[in-house]
Image (tube, rainbow, N blue to C red):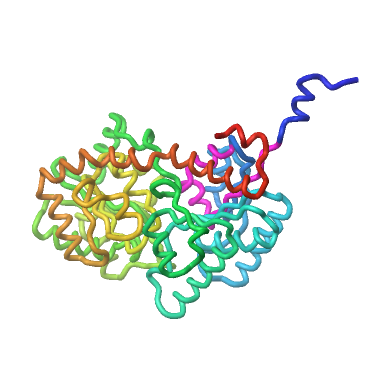
Amino acid sequence: MSAAPTDQHMLNRPTKSKLIRITTVPVSLKVLLRRQLKFMADHFEVIAVSSPGTELDDVQQAEGVRTVAVPMTRAITPWQDIRALWGIYRLFRKERPAIVHTHTPKAGLLGMIAAKMAGVPVRLHTVAGLPLMEKKGFTRRLLEFIEKVTYNCATKVYPNSERLAQFLIDHRFCKTTKLQVLGNGSSNGIDTTHFKVTAALEAEARQLRREKGIAPGDFVFVFIGRLVKDKGLEELVAAFTALHTKYKGVRLLLVGPYEEALDPLSAHTMHSIQNDPAILQADFQHDIRPWLMAGQVLVFPSYREGFPNVPLQAGCLNLPSIVTDINGCNEIIQHNLNGLVIPPKEVAALQAAMEQLLTDQALYAHMKQQARDRIIQRYDQQQLWQLLLNEYQEQLSKHELVRPILQTAH
């Protein structure tokens, strides 16, 4: 007896190629790759891997993909790293993915080594900032070695900005033929429909300002990110404190968690944050839109980045940005168009830029008008996802792994 047509169709239906995405901690999957996994799940069987945590459960629910927890640390912990490597290797041997794509330094190292050991044909790693840029001596040499091992095990490496790609080339981290920047940069682009000014968000921002005791006429500089030294918090607090001695109607809004174990702020800076009534601090926020809109200018004086999301998000909400002249930031922000670009680690330059946008109303209005359009034109999320999908298909084709279901995705 022959099978029913529907049954026969199911028997002949080609299976999706398996794609495993790995980050060290689950918040990276949840926030930095938001909605990208769901998009890829239309074309692949996607498995998301990171350290355990409630955020990993959130990823499974929000993205509709299978998740696997493998304990990993962000620090150098040899014995824990070996156990993690073994766990990831066993996962690859069990799942037999066609593609493994890693993000963040530790997940990149362990994921690329394990993928090569397990014979995964397409091994991809995204570079989004290098902690080693701010290290010296033995620590820097060790981190450079780790990066080179990661890139050596990968079949393709994706720096998420042009300047970062040039840094890898200049320091000979890997062959230039392995490197590629997708589009204009970024790991996930920006959801321009989510980050868009609405009446409801404006109402939330006004309520937030009232709750924080911000007067209607106050000018607010806002920072979003980890409250650590290498994000420029020492310089930001010093610059704002000096600015506040000249202009009383200014506020500094800091939104993000402290990381005392990895890169703690100085006691002096902590004292200023906790005791200056003009400096307002809030912990990690799941929705940063009203917090950005509660301010007039984003200040992002980081020492190092790959391709930061916050200036993209701020721009989409019509905020000019003050950023440092580093990878990614100096590609998102064009000086005097949608923000100001200043040297890193210079308090005087940062204070001058803040004062300029505070006092030059014509310049501020011009930048505010330009902010959203530049982001939409260069970093729309859907465009970046399609570029990455095309890249996956090209890599599968190169390794003769293309299946019929993928050929319809062009």
Q: Is residue 374 left or right of residue 191?
A: left
Q: Is residue 271 left or right of residue 13?
A: left
Query: In x, y percent, where is residue 131?
Result: 42, 66
Query: In x, y percent, where is residue 155?
Result: 58, 57
Query: In x, y percent, where is residue 140?
Result: 44, 74
Q: Which residues are magenta?
A: 15-41
Question: In the rendered structure, does residue 36 fall within the stretch colored magenta?
Answer: yes
| Residue located at (10% from left, 43% from top) | 362
Residue 80 occupies which quadrant of the picture? bottom right
Camera-side residue: 87 or 378?
378
Q: Residue furthest bottom?
A: 137
| Residue located at (24% from left, 37% from top) | 206
Q: Quadrant of the N terminus?
A: top right
Q: Is residue 271 visible?
A: no
| Residue located at (57% from left, 45% from top) | 394
Residue 296 occupies which quadrant of the picture? top left
Q: Is residue 255 left or right of residue 24?
A: left
| Residue located at (37% from left, 42% from top) | 379
Residue 207 occupies which quadrant of the picture? top left
- Number of labels in the image equals 0
Q: Is residue 333 visible?
A: yes
Query: In x, y percent, where is residue 354?
Result: 17, 55
Question: In the rendered structure, does residue 283 fall within the stretch colored magenta?
Answer: no
As displayed, is residue 283 above or below residue 204? below
Q: Quadrant of the C terminus?
A: top right
